[in-house]
Image (cartoon, grey):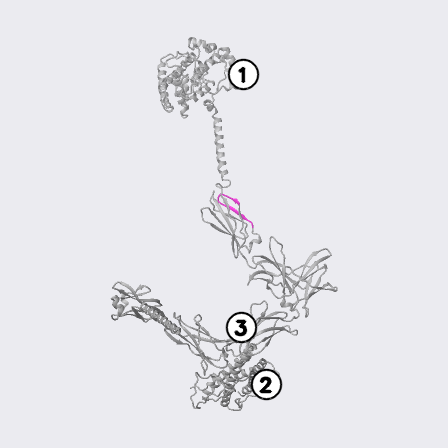
Amino acid sequence: MPLLLVLHWKHGAGSPLPITPVNATCATRHPCPSNVMSQIRNQLAQLNSSANALFILYYTAQGEPFPNNLDKLCAPNVTDFPPFHANGTEKVKLVELYRIIAYLGAALGNITHDQKLLNPNALSLHSKLSVTADVMRGLLSNVHCRLCNKYHVAHVDVTYGPDTSDKDVFQKKKLGCQLLGKYKQVIGVVTQAF
Amino acid sequence: MIWKYTSKMMLKVWLVQVLVVFLITECIGELVDTCGVISPESPVIQSGSNFTAFCVLKEKCMSVYEVNASHIIWKVNRVLIPEEQYTVINATTSSVTFTNTGLLNVQLICNILAYGQIEMNVYGVRIQTGFPPEKPKNLNCVVKEGKKMLCQWDPGRETHLETNYTLKSEWATEKFDDCKAKPDTPTSCLVDYSPVYFVNIEVWVEAQNALGKVSSDHINFDPVDKVKPNPPRNLSVSNSEELSSILKLTWINPSIMNVMRLKYDIHYKTKDASTWSQIPPEDTATTRTSFTVQDLKPFTEYVFRIRCMKADGKGFWSDWSRDASGITYEARPSKAPSFWYKILSHTQDSRSAQLIWKALPPSEANGKILDYEVTLTRWKSCSQNYTVSDTNFTVNLTNDRYIATLAARNLVDKSDTSILTIPACDFQATHPVTDLKAYPKDNVLWVEWTPPNKAVRKYILEWCVLSDKSPCVPDWQQESGTIHRTYLRGKLMESKCYLITVTPVYGDGPGSPESTKAYLKQAPPSKGPTVRTKKVGKNEAVLEWDQLPVDVQNGFIRNYTIFYRTIIGNETAVNVDSSHTEYTLSSLTSDTLYMVRMTAYTDEGGKDGPEFTFTTPKFAQGEIEAIVVPVCLAFLLTTLLGVLFCFNKRDLIKKHIWPNVPDPSKSHIAQWSPHTPPRHNFNSKDQIYSDGNFTDVSVVEIEANDKKTFPEDLKSLDLFKKEKVSTEGHSSGIGGSSCMSSSRPSISSGDENESAQNTSSTVQYSTVVHSGYRHQVPSVQVFSRSESTQPLLDSEERPEDLQLVDNVDSGDGLLPQQQYFKQNCSQPKSSPDISHFESSKQVSSSNEEDFLRLKQQQISDPVSQSYGAEQMKMFQGVSTTDAFGFETETQAEKLETLGMEAALDEGMPKSYLPQTVRRGGYMPQ
């Protein structure tokens, strides 16, 4: 029984997934490709190459005061962000990567949802957010497949960011900007680690 | 109250509505209630398989129509199915079986024969046949950058059924939504989701229809390996002033570059070229945004295009970018211009020369030629420099030798120098090229020659179109002195005759030119030769024609073919060498119309000329002369012989045709016979009429030829003659005997009567026989009657003689005799008997001589004449021929009679005295 339910995150997801037994059987629809780790690296590089542009695009789209107050408004101060240990084993790094991508994926879903409401004309931002989310979705699939096929990890506990549905517009923008700032920071580290 | 009433009314309406709906439903149920059903209801069967359908009747229907399963009949598209395919399962069920069904889409109907004979439809179904789907093959997907993934496959055999193709895809951890192919494009499907790179996806196709379901092989791939990138954009080209052989390309990569590394394919060509050259792939195997192309020609415009794909070669090439062009920078002209000259005019002390040169082609000019530098150096003198922007320069020269140089200059530098020696006037050109020939090959005209034994600096090739209508305007080109074969680089036309001249140029001046003719491409002549006849004979004709003008030849005339035929005959062809302008057709038929035409042939075909007709004469030239001249000569010779014969036999002819008539005026009666009675007795008519006897006339007729034949007859003839003379004496003398002859005209012919009248105006003659008897001189002149009607020419010609005679006659009493003669001759019925006699005399000339002789005898013998006249009376009305025949016999009888008479007279004393007129004698009327 597949346990990585986070693959199907959606808007509003903010609570931790239920924890399943560790010794549960791990299975995938078909075997992972032999170059899955290369694919993970490429995906990380893809995300890393576009993270800064996404960040710039985001705060630019939010308008003032964001572009001129990045330090204050977009500082990567994200609470409960999953940790990452670059010097860990591949398995550990993959597990931590899984948690990070799951966290970021859920957060990007919320940001994308909010931006379509707050900046409906920022199509480029919407597109880039969607592409980034898609890439993360693929990355998560590859990490899952790698953990499952090679390390037989059938369950990883993940956490999500705070629910922003009840926040005001500025707060939504600010949290989004902070998250993308954090994302830009973390993805660089993770990319370097793989 | 009102509310209650309203509620009751509404309830009633509702109940009515419900009742109506119930009844309608029941009625429809009854109406659609069938008498039976077919199972299966929607059969779909595989083509080639067996199929059985069952028709089950309902009990109610069976009882109503009194039928059972045996009354079921099956039809397909209203065509009755043979009963052999029926099977009655039980009382209610009948089946029909189809074996090895083909491709069908038919309507199967179950019918019953109600009451045993009324056909009623029970149920109908539509049978569909087809094939189950084949396994899709060649599944492949492509991810166009910025678009969704498109997968394509080969569906295999046509199923003839509605078949659904579904593209299924999944990651290792999740499954995507199915992509259902549209019915009009069952071979591809565009997925709904955006592709995610670097995640393997497994894709397969499921094909399903009523007869089955089948899946293709699964393919597992990373979408990044199926990418077709967008082409690089904003391609631009820039040159370098430092290097005239390079161009730098720059472009903007597609955004996919952020995902994967790219390699490139760069093509380039010169502007006017049709084929592209490729930059070596190894030079463009990495991601880049610019590239410098080397080894290009200076001042040449190049066109570039570029495309890209994933660097590892997986995926697809992008489309080509837009073309971009750039021009390399200028360089020094690589060659000296071709240089030549023409002497325009020449006087005793100077000459006008035009220096001409060819503009350098772009590949050699390496830039825009700004001008040309011309240097002219007279022999052992200082040089003069000229700057010319045109490609020719006219200058006056002395008769000395000159050295001219030429260099082309562009923005960078000037070219090497062309040197040309213009020899002095007295220079004698020598050493021409040999074996010059020109031939077309590969759509250009090649010229080949054998170099002379002298070192050649260069060759000048000149050519022009030969035409009868326009002058030869030569074009020219220069070739290196080391070659001996080249092609003409001018714009040549097909079917035109080019006169090509090759002039070797030596250090001291040009050599002797050599020329030849050639065609770039030959064609059949535009016009055929016009043939005509130069001479036409009875059996041959000499044809001639003019050589075709060069403008219509369109090629080298290799040969002519002459076609000639008669109207009904087959056409005959004769090939004639092209050097000929006339030909002799032999073995022709005389007096025949011939049609002849002529075809001139080049290497590419022939062209007929106009048809020419001529007629051979019936006779050859001189043939008529050959016939006519001999005939004329023969005729002339015959005539001449005839004349000679006549001349030689003139006496005889004259005797028969024109006997000599003695001229009475020259008569000398005194000389005839001294014993002759006085003339007045002879001529005195009155005296004759008075006593009717001649007593002083003796007649002796002696024929030399007859003296042996008729010695005895002569005696009797003499005797007769004596009697005749005496008779004539009694009658009219000469005139009387003439009247007998003049009565020749027939009594039955008016014309002859007229002739007789004419004849009556002529003078009858008597013949005086000179010959004496046995060479004895007759003692007296003998008169014999003449049949001649010839006029007395002597008298007419010599009227004085006639007058003299008349005078004499008148003096001697002859005039009355003539008058009497005329009177007798004017009478139409003077002597009809004798006219018959005369007619018979004219019938046959063969017996004429004998007859004449006999007649003379008759005439000379009044007795025999009287016999003849008497016998002729018996033959009046007999035809001329018969009369002649009889006359001949009569002559014989007459001779016999004469003989008898002679015999009878033998006993009588022979005397020359005139005898009395006996029976049958002539009696004047």
Task: Indicate left or right for B307 with B172 as reference.
Answer: right
Regarding residue B769, the answer to whether it shows in the image is: no
Q: Which residue in the protein does label 2 denote?
A: A73
The image quarter in which residue B104 lies? bottom left
User: Based on the displayed image, in which of its 4 quarters is residue B752 positioned?
Assistant: top left
Viewer-nearest of discs 3 and 1: 3
Main secondary structure type of the part rendered in magenta: strand
Q: Label 1: which residue?
A: B800
Was residue B541 drawn as part of the magenta stretch in this picture?
yes
The residue where tag 3 is placed is B319
Q: Give the percent coordinates (x, y) of residue B472.
A: 62, 56
Separation of marks 3 and 1 at Cα, in angstroms: 145 Å
Disc 3 versus disc 2: nearer the observer = 2
Q: Secondary structure at mark 2?
A: helix
Residues in magenta? B534-546
* Depth order, front residue of B297/B783: B297
Alpha-carbon distance for marks 1 and 2?
A: 185 Å
Disc 3 crowd, CA 10 A, few/some/many (<14, 14-19, 20+) = some
Give the quadrant of the C terminus of chain B: top left
Q: Is residue B893 left or right of residue B589?
A: left
Residue B395 image offset from top left, x and y in percent: 71, 60
Instruction: Check if mark 1 and mark 2 are on a common chain.
Output: no
Residue B366 versus residue B346: which sits nearer the camera?
Answer: B366
Which disc number belongs to residue A128? none
Q: Amino acid at mark 3?
A: Asp
Instruction: Indicate the amino acid at tag 2.
Output: Leu
Q: Is residue A102 visible to us here?
A: yes
